[in-house]
Image (cartoon, grey):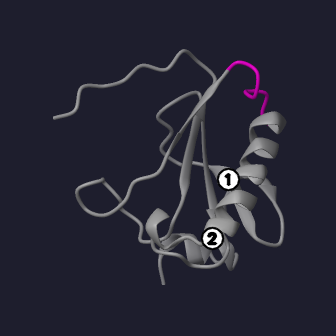
Amino acid sequence: MNVFEKIIKGEIPCKKVLENDKFLAFYDIAPKAPIHILAIPKQGYKDFNAMPKELLAEMSDFIIEVVKKVGIYESGYRLITNIGNDGGQEVPHFHYHILGGAKLRWEALA
């Protein structure tokens, strides 16, 4: 069981932003921006490639709710998802990073 599955089951606490029957959004414990939220489906899909497109559409609506709730809908935000080892995916459970709250820069890729 991965860390996100444990969070969904309530075995690991999180600072929730928004939750419904299909998705959960919570603050990242190691933020890379003033606002850094993770949005995950409650059902376990390994990565973006495995997500059903209908569920991705629903998750898009959920993310819009999240960014409106935390006040970055108008100012702007960044969505990131990592896929596989070369993409930097650390947890094998699909998730978006929602970053905002400041003018974001791109760090050089090494």
Q: Residue at x 55, y 52 (%)?
A: 96
Does residue 54 appear anywhere in the picture? Answer: yes
Vertical side of 17 occupied by 31: above or below: above
Q: CA distance from mark 1 to mark 2?
A: 10 Å
Q: Secondary structure at mark 2?
A: helix
- Indicate whether 61 appears above or below 108: below
Q: Where, by quadrant of the figure, is residue 56 drawn? A: bottom right
Res 47 seen here: no
Instruction: Say whether disc 1 or disc 2 marks the residue closer to the N-terminus.
Output: 2
At 68% across and 80% down in the image, what residue appears? Answer: 9
- Quick one: SS at disc 1? strand
Given the image, on which type of amino acid does mark 1 rest? Phe
Q: Is the residue marked by circle 1 packed among few (<14), some (14-19), or many (20+) residues within 10 Å?
A: many
Residue on which disc 1 sits: 26
Task: Residue at 74% x, 37% y: name it.
Answer: 67
Camera-nearest residue between 110 and 12:
110
Residue holding disc 2: 7
Image position, residue 41 (x, y; %): 65, 68
Dot 2 alpha-carbon crowd within 10 angstroms: few under 14, some 14 to 19, many 20 or more: some
Q: Which residues are magenta?
A: 70-75
Q: Name the quadrant of the C terminus.
A: top left
Residue at 46% across / 74% down in the picture? 46
| Quarter-of-image position of residue 76 | top right
Asked if residue 104 lies in the magenta stretch, the reply is no
- Residue 78 quadrant: top right
Viewer-side residue, 2 vs 50: 50
